[in-house]
Amino acid sequence: MPDPQREGVELTLRDTRMTLPKEVQELLPEENMTYYESTNQMHCGEGLGGSKFEKVNNIFEVIARYPDLATKVKERTDDRETLLAAGAPESAFLPATKGPDAPEGLPEALYFKVEGVEGRLGITRLADLPEDTRVLVRREKGQSDPDEKQYTPVSFTVIRGTEADMPKVDFATIIVGREGGEEGQDAVWTTHPGAPVRPAMKEFDWTRDLRSPEESGGEQEARVVTVKDLLEKAEMSGDDYVKLVPGDMDETLKEYRVLE
């Protein structure tokens, strides 16, 4: 495995990429570097939001810890069974190689578990929260009209505590995908702490009027509900995940126009 540190100097994301084997660099195309930089900021940066790695300097150091990555991508084999056992739902996985009956345009993806990578999760199950926990409901991006191409359902975020209060994990996931099946180019889509679990994004009658920052053009609208409301009135499941962000809910709400 290449050492992502040279003579004790912390490497940049681009420097770390250059320490990786050529066949792994090919899975990290140069044209995707802007996206990788933003992903790196989310998972390794100082800002709030997103799951956080604790003892790596950048996301490419995580990739360096999986030496068989390029070989397994060529073989179309991955660790999805191990990730299922670690808590990932079946719905998290795209096919490694899609069959003849797969929907047109369905991408393919491979999922790899990297052991020994410590991190904190920016998500939590509703069932693991007290019922009176407040939840920020907002449309973070896109359009509120379901008929629009950029339609995006609302998200659900719990804001409380510090980063040390976030759930701890000791492994990471690398996802390598390709569009268009065998003709597509394999590329790393993301790497993050823990299993591939997505936070819930849904729509209800009482959320349809929530506008995104792009739509509002100013103070963003939001609603505040409790976990109990989501479980009983919105009929969400205790196994649904919501975002978990360190901070103070009351201070955060000052940035929004909270609707009744």
Image (spheres, helix red, strand yellow):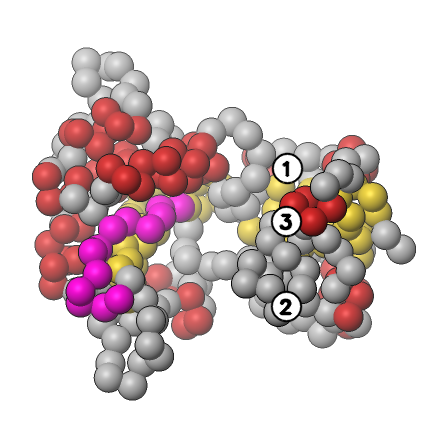
Q: Position of residue 163 (x, y in %)?
A: 57, 35
- Label pair 2/1, CB-CB below 8 angstroms: no
Q: Position of residue 147 (x, y in %)?
A: 62, 69
Drawn side of residue 44 relative to residue 110, left or right: right
Looking at the image, which is closer to me, 62 or 217?
217
Which three-letter amino acid code belongs to the residue tagged 2? Pro
Q: Which residue is mark 2?
A: 146
Instruction: Name the residue at 27% across, 34% down.
Output: 61
- Cα separation, mark 3 vs mark 2, equals 15 Å
Q: Which residue is mark 1?
A: 246
Instruction: Name the residue at 41% across, 58% down.
Output: 196
> Which callout, 3 or 1, points to the residue nearer the camera?
3
Looking at the image, which is closer to me, 219 or 49?
219
Which of marks 2 and 3 precedes in the sequence?
3
Dot 3 crowding, Cα within 10 Å, few <14, some 14–19, many 20+: some
Q: Position of residue 109 (x, y in %)?
A: 29, 63
- Cα separation, mark 2 vs mark 1, equals 31 Å
Q: Which residue is mark 3?
A: 140
Instruction: Name the residue at 33% across, 51% down.
Output: 189
Find the magenta span and give its range: 180-192
- Label pair 3/2, CB-CB below 8 angstroms: no
Q: How many marks?
A: 3
Which three-letter amino acid code belongs to the residue tagged 3? Glu
